[in-house]
Amino acid sequence: MPRSEPDFSHEHHALSAGARCVVGVDEVGRGPLCGPVTAAAVCLDPARIPPGLADSKTLSAARREKLFAELQGVARIAVAHASVEEIDTLNILRASHLAMERAVAALKADFALIDGNLLPRNLPCKGLALVKGDAKSLSIAAASICAKVTRDRLMVDLAQQYPGYGWEVNAGYPTKAHLEALLNLGVSPVHRRSFKPVHNILYQEKIITP
């Protein structure tokens, strides 16, 4: 069965119902062992939608960068984060929703299309949750690209501050090389202590330390 392309139908429906600023919202960074979780909200101009918008996971890094640059010239974009401390305090789902809420609030949106099956509890406007929304909504696809490019760049910067973990290539995800570096180098200040591989290393250290 061929993969369906995202379209603007959900946005048109909200606009026809009276919304003025309809945003697509997506997050990236739930799975990594370190760094913040990042969300983007994007309000597209229906007359200036860049061709080729799709779920960021289906695009090459070069294509994502190109589309991100194009979007910055034709769309309203807000990117927000929830910190490692917030992830460890709240849990990753609530932290990802917090980042979404911050991104939506920054654009003063009055309707949000959210990727996923849950609306953030403190979403500052009306919204609709769309499972696999980045494959259904052009605005969510745009948000997925903006969030992914921004977080990948941030992880490259963090890799320079904390070398050896390979974040410039793995973006903090638990690859074999990252897990081996975690064992050899220990836990960095930006690792998520509530995540099992990191927690287990810290717990073992506590047991070993006299």
Image (cartoon, rainbow, N blue to C red):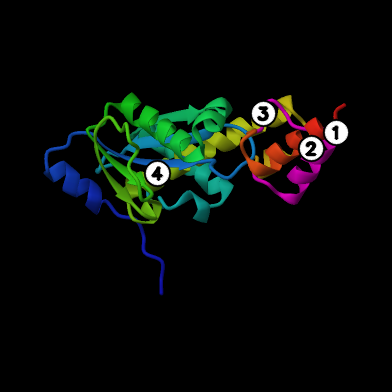
Q: Helix, strand or loop at disc 4?
A: helix
**Image position, residue 138 (x, y; %):** 34, 49
- For disc 1, the marked residue is 208
Mark seen at residue 204: 2
User: Which residue is rendered at x = 77% and y = 38% of the image?
Assistant: 182
Q: Which residues are magenta?
A: 173-191
Q: Secondary structure at mark 2?
A: helix
Residue located 70% across and 43% down the image = 197
The label shown at residue 158 is 3
Q: Position of residue 131 (x, y in %)?
A: 36, 54
How far apart in space, not on screen, are marks 4 and 2 (Cα)? 42 Å
Q: Point out the frontmost of discs 3 and 1.
A: 1
Q: Is residue 20 visible?
A: yes
Q: Marks 3 and 4, Cα distance to the nearest angstrom?
A: 25 Å
Circle 4 residue: 142
Tag 4 near tag 2, CB within 8 Å: no
Which numbered disc flags the more N-terminal residue, 3 or 2? 3
Q: Between 43 and 98, which is closer to the camera in this rendering?
A: 98
Q: Quadrant of residue 109?
A: top left
- Asked if residue 54 lies in the magenta stretch, the reply is no
Closer mark to the observer between disc 3 and disc 2: 2
